[in-house]
Amino acid sequence: EPEVTQTPSHQVTQMGQEVILRCVPISNHLYFYWYRQILGQKVEFLVSFYNNEISEKSEIFDDQFSVERPDGSNFTLKIRSTKLEDSAMYFCASSEGVRSVTFGSGTRLTVV
Amino acid sequence: GIQVEQSPPDLILQEGANSTLRCNFSDSVNNLQWFHQNPWGQLINLFYIPSGTKQNGRLSATTVATERYSLLYISSSQTTDSGVYFCAVGNTNAGKSTFGDGTTLTVKP
């Protein structure tokens, strides 16, 4: 069964550093997403991306976040200057249409 | 935005018991999914079910879209069913899903 692949599975970074989380969505999918889950809390929507542009973003997705599809297969989330409160599990997801979203296994980001 | 409420928040069962998890949502939806988050944090897609009824082994789900709720049934529960069950709904053209707070299921041997 096709999968959404995320790398790395766990990343530790110093506060103030930039991090890039990487994702390879399912190949025939057109919609891409990032979600995050702070430990013990629910999953929160960050951003959706379609046709090489952001189609919707949440209030969490402020200027320190950006997304990019640098080539035909990768989808990245960049956090410019990490804060302690950015520590969370970040999930990439993709879908063929706007329904039935498939999630990756997540990247656990720890900011120290 | 759309509100999602899941109940109960916690559920403890003996192995072999049956259970029903509920998801209420505040608006009409074009997307509803049930996920199981395992102890390693992975979100496993159980059902895509914006309406109707589906079954997959010991699991089944029913969504009554007109009444804005969905139910997830787990029969003959096993210890491996433990984890958090999330309902996620969407009603936008951009594919955004809003998650509920989840139901934490513990199945004891």
Image (cartoon, helix red, strand yellow):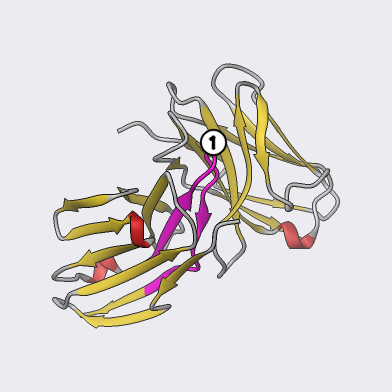
Quick one: quadrant of the N terminus of chain A?
top left
At 60% from the left edge and 53% from the top edge, which residue is drawn?
A: A36
Residue pictured at 16% horizontal, 78% vertical = B17
> In front: B50, or B34?
B50
Mark 1 residue type: Asn
Q: Position of residue B69 (x, y in %)?
A: 36, 63
Decide: is A74 above or below A93: above
Q: Residue furthest top?
A: A72
Considering depth in this image, is A72 or B73 the residue closer to the camera? B73
SS category of the residue bearing label 1: loop
- Determine the residue located farthest toward the front in the rendered image: B66
User: Which chain is mark 1 on?
Assistant: B
Front residue of A109 and A38: A38
Which of the 4 image quarters holds residue A78? top right
**Residue tagged by mark 1?**
B93
Task: Name the side, left or right, on which B29 lies relative to B3.
Answer: left
Q: Write down the region rendered in magenta.
A: B84-104
Q: Which quadrant holds the C terminus of chain A?
A: bottom right
Q: Is residue B96 magenta?
A: yes
Q: Which percent across, then down, holds residue A38?
A: 62, 63
Q: Is A73 displayed left or right of B47 in the figure?
A: right
